Amino acid sequence: MPSLYIHVPFCVKKCDYCAFYSQALINSSEDLIGVYLEGLEIEMAKRRKDAPQGVSSLFIGGGTPTALQDRDLAHLMAMIQRNFHWNPEVEYTIEGNPGTITPAKLTILRSYGINRFSLGVQAFDDKLLSAVGRRHTARQAREAIGHLRTAGFNNLNLDLMFGLPAQDLSRWQASLEEALAYAPEHLSLYGLMLEEGTPLYKRYTAETREKTLNQLPDDDLQAEMQEWAVQRLKEEGYTHYETSNFARPGYECRHNLGYWRGEDYLGFGPGGVSCLNRVRWKIIEDVRVYRSRLQSGQDLADEAGQEPLALQECMAERMILGLRLEEGVNLTAFKNDFGVDLRDIYRDVLERYKAQDVFKIKGDFLCLNPRYSFVANSILQEFV
Amino acid sequence: MAQASQRIRNFSIIAHIDHGKSTLADRLIEYTGALSKREMEEQVLDSMDLERERGITIKLQAVQLSYKANNGEVYELNLIDTPGHVDFTYEVSRSLAACEGALLVVDAVQGIEAQTLANVYLALENNLEIISVINKIDLPSAEPERVKEEIEEVIGLDASEAILASAKTGIGIEEILERIVTMVPPPQGEDQAPLKALIFDSKFDAYKGAISYVRIVEGRVSKGTKMKMMATGKVFEVTEVGVFAPAMRIIEELKAGQVGFIAASIKNVKDTQVGDTITDAENSAPEPLPGYRQATPMVFCGLYPVDASDYNRLRDSLEKLHLNDASLVFEPETSVALGFGYRCGFLGLLHMEIVQERLEREYDLNMITTAPSVIYKVHTLKGEVISIDNPSNLPPIESIVSIEEPVVKATILVPSEYVGAIMELNQEKRGTYFTMDYVSKSRVKLIYELPLSEIVFDYFDQLKSRTKGYASLDYELTGYKETDLVKIDVLLNGEMVDALSFIIHRAKSYNRGRKLVEKLRGIIPRQMFEIPIQSVIGNKVIARETVSALRKDVLSKCYGGDISRKRKLLEKQKVGKKRMNQVGNVAIPQDAFMAVLKIDD
């Protein structure tokens, strides 16, 4: 059973570090959301057949799904419910940003069965928020958390970022401590990455005044932030189940586990990515083109088209994703899926790092020694 | 004496880089109509792209001009171009030996430079008639009177008759041609005597074989002549002879006094050595022309392909360059750090840079170059004398009695305000002061003895930066001197990186060893584990730094939407890492091998 992802490519305004496809609504007079929803109707009718047994999880992401108005949000939810088999046992997540969350929207989402909410807090610190172009304040985040709990969301994730311009260890600690005060079931802690093409990348690769005044924490400071967080969350009883993700036992994100374990997924909406039977493709990142192609029955894939994954690439991905998990890569699943034992096919790599005790076998899993989880890239490169 | 040779004039142009030699040559060619303006590519004589870019001549060229003088007679003028760099002094001396006259071109703003001076002396040694030309007089800052003064002061030539010219605008061109006709003596030499032809350059042609560029000093040569190379004794049958017009034009016969080329299906350019004398095998000259010597490389470095699979391509490319450049020598070499490559020998630093650049541009090779080394003479306990051109081949310290290094006599011309800076530089470079003379009110000529290894290190860059580019340098090898030299090796994570070893004077060794490890610490990226960097002399560690272990190197996010992108990112990083060289467990970026070169003492 594949998982289902719906991309909602709209934000009030894009954040400065964001490289995902999203349209800013702030200065747009067009009814792009209407165009999007029209397209999505056709797409769902057409592609629902790919999930005949229903879906293993749902994630409505973006962009900012909560940037939609009440009416549009209800429209979107009704559409999903109409097209896909609904099972209350399944994890249904939506993500949203403070400043776009109202009790009314949350009531709509709850009524349609959304049972998990992922909130983009990033920092409880207005200076840090504005330094990366986020529109909301810490206060709005606090209010949003209140609304979410009131509305009955008892599976809540908070996203926090470290490595922000001018952030030091104590400011990071302050944000994380405040997050812990709300006892979220799940926390995602992301190190800021400068992605090419983003405003932040431009500002921090050129010699700007901002770069000098608001320096980015160096790798060592980022490592300290990360290490401190791991320790602190462990004390609070969270499991560090993936490189950047922490959860109270039983609250690990089902949907994301699917990606890391190499399961199939369907992505809908412009920018949505699907991977089914070792073919991956992305929907063209343009709302108007998206709708018109659907109306005229054309292929939705972007310029890269359908990307058939070689066996080699699939195995590499299984390793680089699976080793992000604390549990590691499942040996039996690997053998069933690829017909080889990973201990045979990657024997050389496993040997080479033996002296440094990089890999561990635990039951039916191969995992990374947690000591290396934050310097994994040079190891993961061995598998690609 | 044949009447014809009375109307031949053989001359060359002596000038410093940028003083307008190539432009002047172009104007002469254009004026005499050897090529129409439309046919002329800018600066005909500098035919390599590199030469044009750098504004210097690397390979010699020659051109025959036909000039109708004011006296009504038509003269054959042969212009032999000379390379304008210290690395090629020997080649310059041979092309000057092929002439009876020389144009001394001096920039009306810059004045005389060291290189010019050296070449003028060479011309005077060869008894050439020298015609002074002060070029670029169209520039507002031109000071012809000061330059004249310098010519008289420094060289001792009467500059009152110096021609004021501008090759750019054409001023003075006719006067130059007239002066060549009237001042430069016609070639002497009997065309009935046994053949003596001086090779002043050679070039490889895919169809004709190695072609000799010659000045016929005596006798005559034509198709079918059995010619003999007097240095090697090898005999070839001439297939064609001709002149440069400026393209090669085949003619019946070359006679005493003329400049042209001889082709004889010679397979190897080594058989047409610059300075050698060609004679007639059946009617040999009793002795060769004076001045021949074999080109000897002075500077060596290792060239390694970045991609090991390019090794054969590197060999083929070196062989192709060698076809036209007998002074380039190379032999296979293996390095633990860099794999398979070649040890190459060059006439000097510029020659080295040119070869490197040509390999990169014309042959599309991506290479790692090790720090240049000179040839050291090592006296061992066994009483042997070993020549070492690669520091990592130096025998163990305990078996060495002494080491000698090559020294040069360096002539530096510089505005007097920079004398202090030059003295300081030469002090740092272990120089020995010889003399200082004022060549004009504001310029000074300094003569020093310097170790060649110091010149090879970063002398030119320092000279330029400390004198704002106003100093010029010339040097000649004068011999070997015993010095207190040591070898510094670099250990990464305890393993020696052979390509980083270098030989240095003991007094400088601690400082350089420390600077190098500091530099390497900045270049070697942090890796999964800690990496100690040490510089050692023998077993003794003289400096140590540590590259601390990496603490953060991870993709913070990886979800369904960007798995492909993240996989490709890792693939790209992997390729980047592969480009580094591996010694033991340590990945070393290419920059590290250049670091040895870029250290301020």
Image (cartoon, coloured by chain):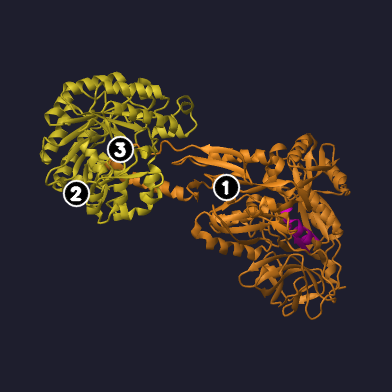
Three-letter amino acid code at disc 3? Tyr
Q: Nearer the viewer, mark 2 or mark 1?
A: 1
Disc number at residue A21? 3
Q: Disc 2, disc 1: CB below 8 Å?
A: no
In the picture, residue B180 is in which quadrant? bottom right
Q: Chain of mark 2?
A: A
What's the distance in space between the residues labelled 2 and 1, CA to CA? 59 Å
Vertical order, B467 against B52 (above or below): above
What's the distance in space between the residues labelled 3 and 2, CA to CA? 23 Å
Q: Are marks 3 and 2 on the same chain?
A: yes
Q: Secondary structure at mark 1?
A: helix
The percent position of residue A117, horizontal first and vertical second, equals 21, 29
Three-letter amino acid code at disc 2? Gly
Chain depicted in orange: B
* Nearer to me, A199 or A5: A5
Q: Colour of chain A?
A: yellow
Residue in the image at 23% along x and 30% along y: A248
Q: Which residue is mark 2?
A: A297
Neighbourhood count class around disc 1 (C-alpha, 10 Å): few under 14, some 14–19, many 20 upward: many
Disc number at residue B593? 1
Three-letter amino acid code at disc 1? Phe
Name the side, left or right, on which A281 lies relative to B371: left
* Nearer to me, B180 or B334: B334
The quadrant of the image that shows the N terminus of chain B is bottom right
Neighbourhood count class around disc 3 (C-alpha, 10 Å): few under 14, some 14–19, many 20 upward: many
Magenta span of residues: B77-96
Residue in the image at 12% along x and 34% along y: A78
